[in-house]
Image: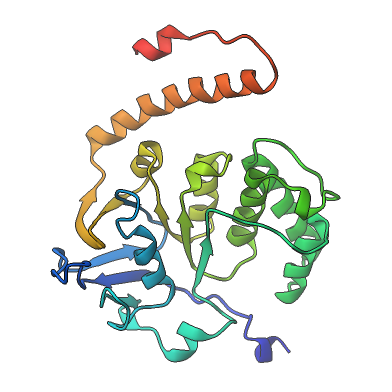
Amino acid sequence: MIDFLGVEGDKGVQSITLKPGFNKYKEAETFDELVINKGEIIAIVGPTGSGKSRLLADIEWGANADTPTKRTVLIDGKAMDIQSRFSSNNKLVAQLSQNMNFVMDLSVEEFVELHAKSRMIENEKEIIEKIFNKANELAGEKFSLDTPITSLSGGQSRALMIADVAILSKSPIVLIDEIENAGIDRKKALDLLVGEDKIVLMATHDPILALMGDKRIIISNGGIDKVMEITKGEKAILHKLESLDEVIQGMRTKLRYGQELEANFEIIKN
């Protein structure tokens, strides 16, 4: 049954290679090729409507010069075969979109259990517990195993799906669209995904998330305009941005619980 369903075995993807196509004006993209290795985090940035989602879609579908951009995506240096591109089983890519709405009348435990059974894993209870605990670490507000998935907030839903994808999904590539809007602990989410040997690409407008990556892809007019390495100077800026973000998150918490706001000017000055 495991062989029939095609759910066994690690796909062992080590890298993705992007080869250039064209922007919406039919102008050639200005990079030679981009190789993204396992364990790397790549930020995809650009104005709204610039083509970030199109790049994610090209990667998800294993583009072979047959999408509007004419880009080519190679997995471990080879084009994806038809089965890998269009099969519902053994998908190489898991995508976490901005909006997640559950429609099944299941509890959190039943939902994760259903996915675990579909993977035919042996240590089912252990995996369910691990996913549940990790999801609650990511979520701003805790939930229980008995919580109906239809009653989860947007942040709780995203936290559950990130933990599920990181721990239970066999897909070695994870595409995330605007994780900053999810109401979750962003750094812990990325650390969890990378810790499970995923290749992570995220479309974002958040400078903190962009600087958490190893590289960033700049999208303009529907095409890849440039690819930038994250510098040591930018990493130093990241530390200051994270300190400011802690102040903002703390104020949000106080607002939620009806507390008076006070500014920590020492952190802001530093």
> Residue shown at 29%/29% (left/top)?
236
Which residue appears farthest toward the right when viewing the image? 146
Residue 143 found in image quarter: top right
| Position above or below: 107 against 69 | above
Residue 227 found in image quarter: bottom left
Q: Position of residue 123 (x, y in %)?
A: 77, 66
Q: Position of residue 51 (x, y in %)?
A: 32, 60
Q: Is residue 91 found left or right of 110 in the rendered image?
A: left
> Residue shown at 66%/12% (left/top)?
259
> Residue shown at 58%/23% (left/top)?
252
Q: Is residue 131 found left or right of 45 in the rendered image?
A: right
Q: Position of residue 61 (x, y in %)?
A: 42, 77
User: Can residue 120 be seen by looking at this rendering?
Assistant: no
Q: Nearer the viewer, residue 73 or 257?
A: 257
Image quarter (top left, top right, bottom left or bottom right) of the N terminus: bottom right
Q: Is residue 48 found left or right of 70 in the rendered image?
A: right
| Position above or below: 214 against 207 | below
Q: Position of residue 2 (x, y in %)?
A: 70, 86
> Residue shown at 16%/72% (left/top)?
26
Q: Nearer the viewer, residue 151 or 91?
A: 151
| Position above or below: 199 against 266 | below
User: Can residue 40 be seen by looking at this rendering?
Assistant: yes
Image quarter (top left, top right, bottom left or bottom right) of the C terminus: top left
